[in-house]
């Protein structure tokens, strides 16, 4: 009896401690959860459904693939071209022009990979193309559309707004034979620093535009685009291709003929998010894919509340998706995939161009241009 009574007293004495421990556990679990719910409800970020149902359902078939393009690749620029977002090639001088993160437009000689500074825009140059009068046309995310003399001595602002709206991310650019410049503003709402929020919000803030150097007129050709990006004029000069990164497709806008002013699909259901697009003069367009698709991204595109959570985490400095498996896709003049070069270790590949027997790849983050021998 004495032992039983002692055990009973001992058990009874432990009850308050157990209750206190249980309460502490529940409280420590619930408080962060409730705080997160409050933050979620009070945050004004309001993502909407993305019309992914408009994407083609058939998976893309590519006859030639290189899933490990880093194997055997070379790095051009020796760490002197940080974030070379786009490249343009001058075959006469055998020089690549590239737009760098620190604001510099740089030239890279192919014969010895030497790098020289041309001019600093004091912004963030993205797309660029060589003009018809020894100039370089630059889409600077912060400055607008620029005309830079080939010696770098003159920097002229061509345009930085359309229809009363300032450009926030002047992005892709190309020039037609008649001198008209076609370019994109990826978003009129978010600037480059917050461009990820444009993806997460899921609203079409992008525009595809033209600038006529004779009349100095900027015209909005297509609006309500999902992060409008790369631009390429067709070799026949009958249409211009523009990419919408969020929707993983490229469309064409007719600038001549019976379909002038009309928009048609050029290529959709890409295996990644398209950035710059370049015509190589040999029957192929090369499309930079900044990141491959993933389960996380697919789910977030389907459910807006996931994108809101991602946006809140982004505001607190937590990046949810790594954006791997970047690369370059080559398609023919009709938009049929021909070859696909990518690597699961690559991120933010923003463009590619075949020069001779080599593929040169631009990126948003690396301190070099990636060179891959295609033979």
Image (cartoon, helix red, strand yellow):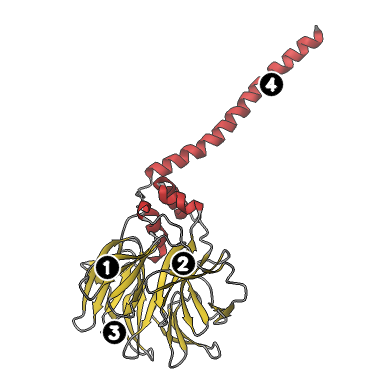
Which quadrant of the rendered structure holds the N terminus?
top right
Q: Are marks 1 and 4 in contact (CB under 8 Å)?
A: no
Badge 2, how many Cα within 10 Å: few under 14, some, many 20+?
many
Q: Which mark is nearer the camera, 4 or 2?
A: 2
Circle nearer the N terminus (4, 2):
4
Q: What's the CA distance linking mark 3 and mark 1?
A: 27 Å
Establish if 10 lies above or below 265: above
Q: Which type of secondary structure does the marked residue at label 1 adopt?
A: strand
Residue at the (27%, 66%) spot, across then down: 263
Q: Residues within 10 Å of mark 3 (few under 14, many from 20)?
A: few
Asked if residue 259 can be seen in this view, the reply is yes
- Distance between mark 2 and mark 1 Cα atoms: 27 Å
Residue 251, quarter of picture: bottom left
Q: Which of the 4 image quadrants contains residue 41?
A: top left
Q: Residue furthest left?
A: 215
Measure the C-alpha gap from mark 4 to mark 2.
Answer: 62 Å
Q: Nearer the viewer, residue 122 or 124?
A: 124
In depth, the one of 146 and 182 nearer the eye is 182
- Residue contact at pointers 2 and 3, CB within 8 angstroms: no
| Element marked by disc 3 | loop
The residue pinned by badge 3 equals: 177
Residue at which label 2 appears: 289
User: On residue 166, which mark appears?
Assistant: 1
Q: Is residue 299 left or right of residue 176?
A: right
Q: Is residue 366 left or right of residue 333?
A: right
Compare marks 3 and 4 and give the one earlier in the sequence. Answer: 4
Task: State how far apart marks 3 and 4 are (Cα).
Answer: 87 Å
């Amino acid at each position: 009896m004495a032992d039983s009574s002692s055990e009973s007293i001992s058990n009874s004495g432990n009850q308050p401690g157990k209750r206190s421990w249980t309460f502490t556990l529940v409280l420590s679990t619930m408080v962060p959860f409730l705080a997160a719910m409050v933050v979620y409800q009070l945050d004004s970020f309001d993502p909407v459904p993305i019309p992914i149902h408009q994407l083609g359902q058939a998976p893309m078939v590519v006859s030639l693939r290189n899933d490990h393009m880093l194997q055997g690749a070379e790095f051009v620029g020796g760490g002197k071209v940080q974030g070379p977002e786009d490249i343009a090639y001058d075959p006469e001088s055998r020089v690549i022009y590239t737009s760098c993160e620190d604001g510099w437009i740089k030239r890279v000689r192919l014969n010895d990979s030497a790098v020289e500074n041309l001019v600093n825009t004091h912004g963030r140059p993205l797309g660029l193309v060589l003009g018809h009068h020894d100039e370089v046309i630059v889409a600077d995310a912060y400055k607008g559309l620029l005309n830079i003399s080939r010696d770098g001595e003159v920097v002229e602002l061509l345009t930085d707004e359309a229809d009363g709206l300032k450009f926030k991310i002047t992005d892709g650019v190309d020039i037609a034979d008649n001198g008209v410049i076609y370019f994109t503003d990826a978003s009129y709402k978010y600037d480059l620093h917050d461009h990820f929020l444009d993806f997460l919000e899921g609203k079409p803030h992008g525009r595809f535009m033209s600038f006529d150097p004779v009349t100095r007129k900027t015209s909005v050709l297509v609006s309500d685009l999902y992060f409008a990006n790369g631009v390429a004029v067709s070799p026949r000069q009958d249409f211009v291709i523009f990419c919408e990164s969020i929707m993983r497709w490229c469309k064409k806008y007719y600038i001549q003929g019976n379909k002038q002013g009309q928009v048609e699909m050029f290529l959709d259901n890409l295996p990644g998010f398209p950035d710059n697009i370049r015509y190589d003069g040999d029957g192929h367009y090369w499309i930079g894919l900044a990141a491959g698709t993933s389960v996380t991204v697919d789910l977030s595109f389907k459910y807006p509340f996931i994108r809101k959570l991602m946006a809140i985490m982004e505001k607190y400095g937590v990046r949810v998706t790594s954006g791997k498996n970047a690369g370059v896709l080559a398609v023919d003049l009709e938009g049929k995939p021909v070859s696909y070069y990518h690597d699961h270790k690559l991120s933010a590949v923003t463009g590619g161009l075949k020069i001779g027997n080599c593929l040169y790849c631009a990126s948003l983050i690396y301190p070099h241009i990636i060179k891959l021998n295609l033979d």
